[in-house]
Image: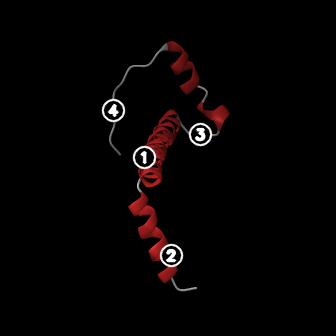
Amino acid sequence: MQQAKFSVEEAQVNFLNSFKTYGFKDKSSLVRTAIDHFKNNLELESLKKSAELYSEIYSEDDSLKELTETALTMWPE
């Protein structure tokens, strides 16, 4: 596993030092979990924005609605 050096504020150090309280075996596992959680949240937000954009485009484009309806009628039941 690679190591990284970074600076944190005192309150963040205090939180990291409480790693056992939150069920982590060490500070590094707490930080890795926090990074993964943050990354997943960013990806989820990106997907939500993309879905909203597609929804907006679909709602404004009658030809897309027609294409969708045509595809649905041909879909096997």
Query: Sequence order check: which comes first, mark 1 or mark 2?
Result: 1
Tell me the SS state at disc 1: helix
Q: Nearer the viewer, mark 2 or mark 4?
A: 2
How many marks overall?
Answer: 4
Instruction: Name the residue tied to disc 2.
Output: 72
Instruction: Name the residue tied to disc 1.
Output: 53
Depicted 46 relative to depicted 7: above or below: below
The C terminus - image quarter: bottom right
Instruction: Please name the amino acid that badge 4 sits on.
Output: Ala
Q: Are marks 2 and 3 in contact (CB under 8 Å)?
A: no
Q: Nearer the viewer, mark 3 or mark 1?
A: 1
Q: Are marks 3 and 1 in contact (CB under 8 Å)?
A: no
Q: How is the image coloured?
A: secondary structure
Query: Sequence order check: which comes first, mark 3 or mark 1?
Result: 3
Q: Residue at x 61, y 27 (%)?
A: 18
Q: CA distance from mark 2 to mark 3?
A: 49 Å
Tell me the SS state at disc 4: loop
Q: Position of residue 35 (x, y in %)?
A: 46, 38
Instruction: Name the residue tied to disc 4.
Output: 4
Q: CA distance from mark 3 to mark 1?
A: 39 Å
Determine which of the numbered discs, if any, sits on residue 32 in the image.
Answer: none
Q: Position of residue 53 (x, y in %)?
A: 42, 46
Q: Nearer the viewer, residue 19 or 75?
A: 75
Instruction: Name the residue tied to disc 3.
Output: 24
Instruction: Please name the amino acid that badge 3 sits on.
Output: Phe
